[in-house]
Image (tube, rainbow, N blue to C red):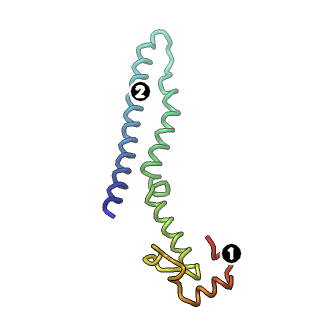
Amino acid sequence: MEDRQYKLAKRRVEKKKGFYVHLGVYIAVGVFFFIINLVTMDQEPQVWFFYPMIPWLIAIMIHYFTVFGLPGTDILTEDWEEREIEKEINKIQQSSPFALPPEQTENFKLDDLPKAQKEEIKRGNWQNEDFV
């Protein structure tokens, strides 16, 4: 379990690091464009440096939301996705007439079912909702 947690934490840190590198490159290129714009102002009195930066800013914002989630919510984070998967698994397990406790689902064999459930399976008394 600790190995899985370490890998998950490492992956999250790598994603955060990737975002910060992306942001740093964005700022460096923005400063570079700004300096070039200032140097060329004598020939062309226009401010153009932010035009190529706007689409990139949108990409930076999307990158931020995928790494850190929307401020005030956690819909785009992996934690939210894992919690939702857990909820759905619990709903499925609770609604199934043949639901087994989670500790019994590993290495499950049909022979492990009680005789009454085996008979019900053989008779075919089930609804489409019983299947996932």
Q: Secondary structure at mark 1?
A: helix
Residue located farthest toward the front when viewing the structure as drawn: 111
Q: Quadrant of the C terminus?
A: bottom right
* 108 lies left or right of 95: left
Residue 22: quarter of image: top left
Residue located farthest toward the top when viewing the structure as drawn: 43
Residue drawn at (58%, 79%) of the image? 96
User: Residue 51: horizontal and vertical position, in percent?
Assistant: 52, 27
Residue drawn at (39%, 26%) of the image? 31
Residue drawn at (57%, 81%) of the image? 98
User: Residue 56: horizontal and vertical position, in percent?
Assistant: 49, 33
Q: How many C-alpha atoms fall within 10 Å of the one at disc 2: few (<14), some, or many (≥20)? A: some
Identify the amino acid type marked 1: Asn
Q: How many C-alpha atoms fall within 10 Å of the one at disc 1: few (<14), some, or many (≥20)? A: few
The residue carrying mark 2 is 29
Residue 1: quarter of image: bottom left
Nearest the viewer among 125 and 109 is 109
The image's mark for residue 128 is: 1
Residue 117: quarter of image: bottom right
Q: Secondary structure at mark 2?
A: helix
